[in-house]
Image: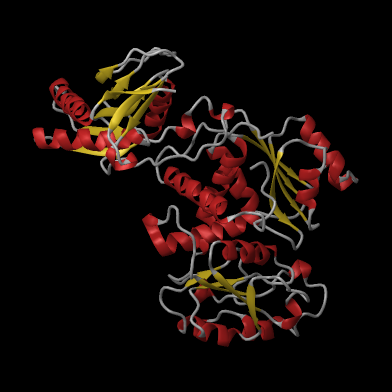
Amino acid sequence: MKHLLSTKDLDRDTAVGILDVAEDMADVATREMKKLPTLRGKTVINLFFEDSTRTRTSFEVAAKRLSADLINFTAKGSSVSKGEGLKDTAQTLAAMGADAVVVRHSASGAAQVLAESKWIDASILNAGDGTHEHPTQALLDAFTMRKRLHGEASRGRDLAGLRVTIVGDILHSRVARSNVWLLNTLGASVNLVAPATLLPSNTTGWPVTIGYDLDESIDADPDVVMMLRIQAERMHAAFFPNPREYSRQWGLDDERLSRLRPDTMVMHPGPMVRGLEISAGAADSSRSTVLEQVANGVSVRMAVLYLLLAGAAES
Amino acid sequence: MTARTVLQPADITRALTRISHEILESNREWLDTVVLGIPTRGVVLAQRIGATMVSAADLPIAVGSLDVTMYRDDLARNPTRAPGRTAVPAGGIDGKLVILVDDVLYSGRTIRAALDALSAIGRPRYVRLATLVDRGHRELPIRPDFVGKNLPTTEGERINVRLLEIDGVEEVTIES
């Protein structure tokens, strides 16, 4: 594997393999000495054209735990704000000897452009491109589900039979897209719930069922309810009348929470807007995996960096 | 390619029993002992050695595994390998006698990596090395403390250790 651009092109064995390596990385995080010498001498660049705290920090912790050198390159206050294009930025990073570039960009397909261009020879990790994909988020979500389901016996297993409901702004969500493909590959079934205005107009070929009523989906007794953030920065049209109405119809409030089984997982990729898509009660309940997701994010990103960078370059 | 069997099941059992008793005899300070196998086959050997030691001596003996993949110096020369499991017994290794167990000792680079991996987990009082087969050709200043069988080889030959728990058969063969 040279790049990680999407979850759509991961097959089951590759995906399970990544999650298994992440298990080993999670073991490292439990011991006093959390650093591995594996990527000593490798340079990883965080190239973020969009705001991010947890993904950028998570990659940073992951790279440092593996002893790679990590450089943060954010668009704000950089040559990009002076008008530099993606090509020149990439060539600059190549000239500095980057072995991997973790890229987040507002344009769908930006990571793929970098990977297929001849501008830079480094491994490209997609950390979110527009409304397209965010593969490491889906991998850490799958890792979290598998860990809650199977605990210590997680290695080698997929998510066969698991029923996952994803709620919220599917239209703009790269997290949802990456999850749809990966969960399907791992044998889980996915139900999307959203206002019709926040669903893509064309979901032909998506391996999902679609609903518009959260209460119906909750009464169908899902194993996982994944709430998505209402992305204020992408709400450029009147997708719903107002936040209160959205919250009442599609928010996970305490009453809906109480109708879920005690072992139903409540997931959220963060950052959460408490009181809008998720109530404080749901976010802080024992069903919530939000903090596990953050911790597992580091393990999964360590696994991906290891698999992309440690071995001999593939020709 | 011809394969010649050099150790039969009974030879392997005898070698491991002898190693177990040698370890016990060498433990003059009567220290808590942790037997750590290096995946894959070293783990099985460590379990067998640990079991023999437990049945022969009334001493706290724990068995675990130590994966060295992340500490290897040849990672960038080979295709990416999936790491194995590290399972350190609950009591840790600080101040204890640690016995590293591998199936075949060759260049010594795996053991070099294992020593690094150990230092990230704790600080044992002593670290000793047990191997079922020592085939020579060391590239580093490393030597075993307990050896099942010394097998002089040429570099082109291959030693295959097959164990019942993993391979369904029990033998050591030399391929040339």
Image quadrant for the N terminus of chain A? top right
Residue B9 image offset from top left, x and y in percent: 22, 31
Pick the front one: A111 or B46: B46
Residue A190 image offset from top left, x and y in percent: 59, 72
- Image quadrant assignment for residue A40: top right
Residue A57 image offset from top left, x and y in percent: 61, 48
Pick the front one: A74 or A144: A144
In the displayed orientation, state which residue is furthest to the right. A83
Asked if B157 appears above or below A307 in the picture, the reply is: above
> Is any atom of residue B18 visible in this view?
yes
Pick the front one: A261 or B75: B75
Pick the front one: B171 or B147: B171
Looking at the image, residue A86 sits to the left or right of residue A189; the answer is right
Looking at the image, residue A25 sits to the left or right of residue B105; the answer is right
Residue B145 image offset from top left, x and y in percent: 26, 18
Residue at 45% x, 57% y is A157
Image quadrant for the C terminus of chain A? top right
- Image quadrant assignment for residue A176: bottom right
Looking at the image, residue B149 sits to the left or right of residue A175; the answer is left
Number of numbered discs visible in the structure rendering:
0
Residue at 30% x, 34% y is B36
Which color scheme is applied? secondary structure
Asked if A256 appears above or below A67 in the picture, the reply is: below
> Is any atom of residue B93 visible in this view?
no
Residue at 49% x, 35% y is A36
